[in-house]
């Protein structure tokens, strides 16, 4: 008998395609054709007929914007009936000019999507008529379903849709900076965290920024995700972001009513215009 102590997903679906170049990977999504800071037309990634089992994890990577120095907010959409009557599952996923050569901008959401649901995306941008490539992976059929921890909702905190950015924060220079103002208050208990990082600055410095996510109040905070890295490899206005923080997987319980904050450091004098959005899985 094969012994499998880990929880192995027996079903995976991706939209990567067969041509592994930045211009071809995944699915192209588009911002509004004429208006900045407005969501464009929703794009279907998969029809419901292709989601043959319950999904427990969603991985997203964004890359190759058609215009440099752009900021994006992207909604993950689901229609449980398998059509195109979309509901937003994760709102305003932040992306900052993602660079293909340093793996783009990535997210991981342990959330449940029922079999037969169609899955889509819609996007707004700081500039109209911009396109972006979206790579999506969904996973299901766990070998040990009794061990699955998968959420039913995601709360987005700190998004500023009117300007396609998040809540401002200031990194320290080679030292941890002060906590930001609150990005918002949890309306439900949360246990898993993701960070979005966008820079409202047309000239970005080559640097690394590490961001901690915390929950609590003005006097007492717990770290929920330590050192989410945002990397700007050069002054060509491109960036990359990993889904998982350097300080370990972002599992941490925080109760409803907690305020959410970020603090950060940069390895050089930080750019102006750093903003953050936090995603709390419940």
Image (cartoon, helix red, strand yellow):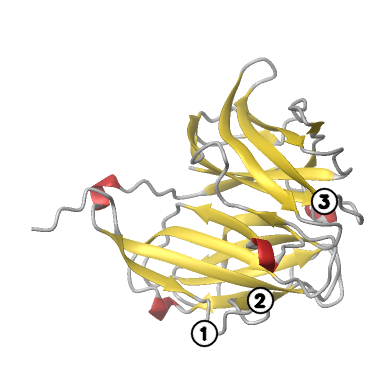
Residue name at image x 74 percent, y 72 percent: 40
* Mark carried by residue 206: 3
Vertical comparison of 91 with 222: above or below: below
Disc nearer the start of the sequence (3/1): 1
* Mark carried by residue 156: none
* Front disc: 2 or 3: 3
Marks 2 and 1: CB-CB under 8 Å? no
Quadrant where the N terminus sits is bottom left
Q: CA distance from mark 2 to mark 1?
A: 12 Å
Q: CA distance from mark 2 to mark 3?
A: 22 Å
Marks 3 and 1: CB-CB under 8 Å? no
Q: Secondary structure at mark 3?
A: loop
**Label 1: which residue?**
18
Vertical comparison of 45 with 223: above or below: below
Query: Residue reaching furthest bottom?
Result: 18
Disc 2 crowd rating (10 Å Cα; few below 14, some 14-19, many 20+) is some
Where is residue 102 shown, x and y percent of the image? 66, 61
Vertical comparison of 142 with 68: above or below: above
**Label 2: which residue?**
22
Disc nearer the start of the sequence (2/3): 2
Where is residue 23 shown, x and y percent of the image? 68, 80
Quadrant in which residue 130 is drawn: bottom right
Query: Residue reaching furthest left?
Result: 1
Query: Residue reaching furthest top?
Result: 219
Please give left or right for residue 235 compared with residue 100 in the image.
Answer: right
Q: Secondary structure at mark 1?
A: loop
Residue name at image x 75 percent, y 71 percent: 65
Disc 3 crowd rating (10 Å Cα; few below 14, some 14-19, many 20+) is some
Where is residue 93 shown, x and y percent of the image? 66, 56
Q: Nearer the viewer, residue 267 or 187?
A: 267
Disc 1 crowd rating (10 Å Cα; few below 14, some 14-19, many 20+) is few
Q: Secondary structure at mark 2?
A: loop
């Amino acid at each position: 008998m094969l012994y499998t102590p880990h929880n192995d997903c027996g079903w995976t679906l991706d939209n990567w395609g067969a041509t592994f170049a930045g211009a071809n990977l995944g699915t192209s999504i588009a911002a509004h054709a004429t208006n900045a800071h407005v969501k464009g037309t929703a794009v279907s990634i998969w029809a419901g007929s292709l989601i043959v089992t319950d999904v427990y994890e969603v991985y997203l990577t964004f890359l190759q914007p058609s215009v440099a120095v752009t900021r994006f907010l992207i909604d993950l959409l689901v229609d449980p009936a398998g059509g195109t009557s979309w509901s937003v599952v994760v709102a305003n996923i932040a992306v900052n000019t993602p660079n293909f050569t340093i793996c783009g901008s990535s997210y991981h959401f342990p959330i449940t999507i029922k079999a037969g649901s169609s899955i889509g995306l819609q996007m707004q941008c700081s500039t109209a008529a911009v396109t972006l490539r979206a790579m999506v992976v969904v996973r299901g059929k766990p070998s040990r379903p009794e061990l699955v921890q998968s959420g039913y909702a995601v709360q987005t905190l700190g998004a500023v849709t009117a300007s396609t950015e998040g809540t401002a924060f200031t990194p320290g220079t080679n030292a941890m900076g002060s906590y930001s103002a609150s990005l918002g208050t949890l309306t439900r208990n949360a246990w898993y965290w993701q960070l979005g990082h966008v820079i409202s600055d047309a000239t970005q410095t080559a640097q690394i920024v590490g961001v901690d996510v915390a929950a609590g109040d003005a006097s007492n905070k717990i770290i929920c995700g330590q050192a989410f890295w945002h990397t700007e490899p050069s002054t060509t206005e491109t960036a990359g972001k990993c889904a998982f923080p350097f300080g370990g997987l972002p599992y941490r319980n925080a109760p409803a009513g907690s305020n959410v904050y970020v603090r950060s450091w940069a390895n050089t004098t930080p750019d102006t215009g750093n903003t953050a959005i936090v995603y709390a899985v419940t």
